[in-house]
Amino acid sequence: MQLLDGKIASRAVKEQLKAKVDKIIASGARPPHLAVILVGNNGASETYVASKVKTCAEIGYQSTEIRREVDITEADLLSEIQKLNNDVSVDGILVQLPLPKHIDEKKVIAAIDPAKDVDGFHPVSAGNLTLGMPTFIPATPYGIMLMLEHYNISTKGKHAVVIGRSNIVGRPMSILLSTNNPYGNCTVTLCHSHTPNLEEICLQADIVVAALGRPGFVKAEMVKEGAIIIDVGITRVEDATAKKGFRIKGDVDFDAVAPKASFITPVPGGVGLMTIAGLLQNTLVAYEKRQQA
Ligand SMILES: NC(=O)c1ccc[n+]([C@@H]2O[C@H](COP(=O)([O-])OP(=O)(O)OC[C@H]3O[C@@H](n4cnc5c(N)ncnc54)[C@H](OP(=O)(O)O)[C@@H]3O)[C@@H](O)[C@H]2O)c1
């Protein structure tokens, strides 16, 4: 079994990005600029935003964090987005999800200028992805593709089972793995909560991508010998012995599954770190396109 280490793979991506940004700055141009909107004070969202902002600084991007109260109206949030759409110094806009219940996430995502949609959630980005056109790929599936590329994992002709069909992880992941690209060309089965015989389907998988948000869901008896296991799940599980009172758990029962796997991502330290790498890669693309426009 080989660990697919998000620290190593994301460091490699960040080093490449930093080298590009260093060149941009040395040429006298401004660096790429990511704007992040955080509504309210959800603990997990705070952590994600802090880590995105910190990584921007590490590689030389400019970042702006815009914090708004949990009771901001939908109209005010839409107007914040409009301001960022019109701001020529901003290349990428990210609205940290989830949003409070009174705000329509779909409306907010659709309000982002598709040219600045570095999270890849806008309908235009999703449509382009489906058609195999160049686009912003949602950061988590993109990060997984970067991980496969870093470890040069052969995917062609393999049967990939993706568990979870969300617009941000499972569905775009299933599209990427089925697309004709160097780390695609899989035969893909996309599973969800209405899939019967999930265990049998998983047992046929050469690659399992678990993205359902159920800690420890994928057990050893669901996995065939030598399978490649990608664990996307991040759930905070109460743990009185942990400093923060919780531990992060993935969707795979790591200790039991790892001995059967050929490759496996840990949680934490796997896909989560690659998600940021995907986001920063998208931000550079947005910057370059806007410079050329
Ligand atoms: N590592 C990262 O950077 C990263 C990024 C994003 C998300 N995540 C994590 O990834 C997990 C999934 O996130 P998400 O946003 O995609 O979640 P989501 O929007 O809640 O979607 C979960 C999906 O899993 C399916 N599902 C739920 N229970 C199932 C079951 N028992 N059997 C089969 N399918 C089941 C659901 O099916 P239905 O459609 O039928 O309801 C749904 O399609 C979460 O733990 C999240 O925290 C991690």
Image (spheres, grey):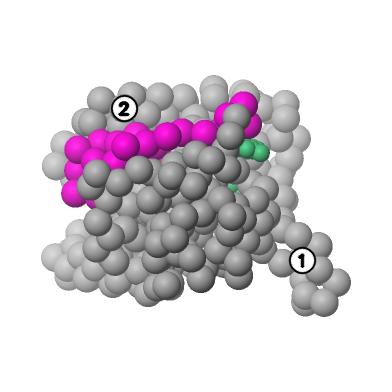
Within the displayed image, which quadrant is ligand 1 positioned in?
Answer: top right
Which secondary structure, mark 1? strand
Q: Relative to 128, is 242 above or below?
A: below
Report which residue position mark 1 lands on: 246
User: Image point 19% across, 49% down: which residue?
Assistant: 182
User: Image point 57% across, 43% down: which residue?
Assistant: 199
Q: Relative to 13, is 209 above or below?
A: above
The picture places residue 130, in percent across and down from the top left corner, at 31, 27
Which secondary structure, mark 2? helix
Which callout, 1 or 2, points at the residue further toward the start of the chain?
A: 2
* In the image: residue 172, left or right of residue 38: left
User: Image point 72% across, 30% down: which residue?
Assistant: 101
Q: Residues within 10 Å of mark 1 (few under 14, many from 20)?
A: some
Q: Nearer the viewer, residue 82 or 39?
A: 39
Q: Nearer the viewer, residue 90 or 136?
A: 136
Q: Is mark 2 within 8 Å of ligand 1?
A: no
Of the numbered discs in the image, which one, if any, rests on residue 286?
none
The picture places residue 150, in percent across and down from the top left corner, at 28, 65
The picture places residue 111, in percent across and down from the top left corner, at 47, 26
User: Image point 67% across, 48% down: which residue?
Assistant: 214
Q: Is residue 186 magenta?
A: yes
Q: Report the amino acid beneath label 1.
A: Phe
How far apart, in angstroms, are the residues tagged by discs 1 and 2? 38 Å
Identify the image quadrant of residue 76.
Answer: top right
> In the rendered structure, which segment of residues is drawn in magenta?
172-195
Residue 166 at least partly seen: no
* In the image: residue 205, left or right of residue 152: right
Q: Is residue 142 magenta?
A: no
- Of the 4 image quadrants, the one containing the N terminus is bottom left
Q: Nearer the viewer, residue 9 or 186?
A: 186
